[in-house]
Amino acid sequence: MKPVLTDMRQVILIVVILGLAFIFSYIARKALTRYALHSSKNLNVSPTNFRLLKTASSFTIFILALIIVFHLLPGLEKIGTTLLASAGILSVIIGLAAQQTFGNIISGIFIFMYKPFRVGEYVELNNGKNGIVEDINLRFTVIRSGENRRMIIPNTLISNEVVINSNVNFNRVCIFLNIPLAYDADIDKAISEIQRLVAVHPDYYDSRTPEWMQKESPNVPVRVTSLDHFSVNLCAEAWCNTDTASYAMKCDLLLAIKKSFDKEGIKMATQTIKVILEHPGFEPEKKEPQN
């Protein structure tokens, strides 16, 4: 009776292992299908391109289940050990071949954990590229630029980049307006006009604290940054409500300042170059050599 019970237990255990393999395979394929549908929409590719990944996941799960089953059957332990050794060698080969892919996956996991940026946030990279984060998956990050182009950056690369994210903790940003004035322009009038135009912009944010307001600090600081050969350079600090609106706000203010200065007669600096032209018939006087 005991051998029969032992055999029944082994059969039940094998059935349970194979059943768990089917369940895990089903869950893995479902998860990969959902991931494929999500990624295919963002990258404009067909979901069928992910079929190989789903097949490979099911194959791996069933191979592991068969190795466990062979170890449980008497007399087949050697086959199970051989399969396990072969799987180990195969995993080393695949690991070396897909080292960069695994690196991207690990970097993607760390991005999900620490969240240096999120989907929908505006970021700027140290190579000058910028845009809105559109998708973050286990292999790469998709950033949509201002030209509506997608930058697909592997997670290992973006993890080593210096990412400027203005949405972390504080979404408001300060933009700097550099205005060159002529030396004979009315500086006080120009500063007053710049402060007025910035304050009436719909995206302007008053960053002054109650203490600064009590001290009657200006809502828009305007400072003389340098005295060049042709201009007195002013710099205005204008705070914007959101980082995404800061570029449009800067463009609007520069246009408004130019029109207002023209209307008020405030001269902006222009660099002039003096060019001396010789008369076409003019010939320089030739001097005779002295003995």
Image (cartoon, helix red, strand yellow):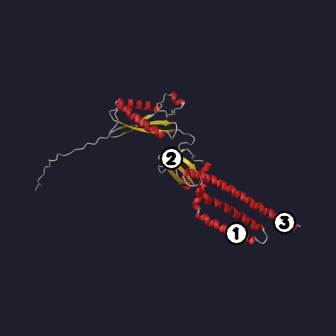
- Report the residue marked by disc 3: 6
> Relative to the observer, which residue lies in front, 229 or 248?
248
The residue type indicated by label 3 comes to: Thr
The percent coordinates of residue 83 (x first, y second) are 70, 69
Disc 2 and disc 3: Cα gap in Å? 64 Å
The residue drawn where x is 69% and y is 55% is: 27
The residue drawn where x is 51% and y is 30% is: 212
- Report the residue marked by disc 2: 131
Q: Residues within 10 Å of mark 3 (few under 14, many from 20)?
A: few
- Report the residue marked by disc 1: 83
Q: Are marks 2 and 1 in contact (CB under 8 Å)?
A: no
The vertical placement of 148 against 73, above or below, is above
- Dot 2: element: strand
The vertical placement of 238 against 44, above or below, is above
- Dot 1: element: helix
Numbered-mark total: 3
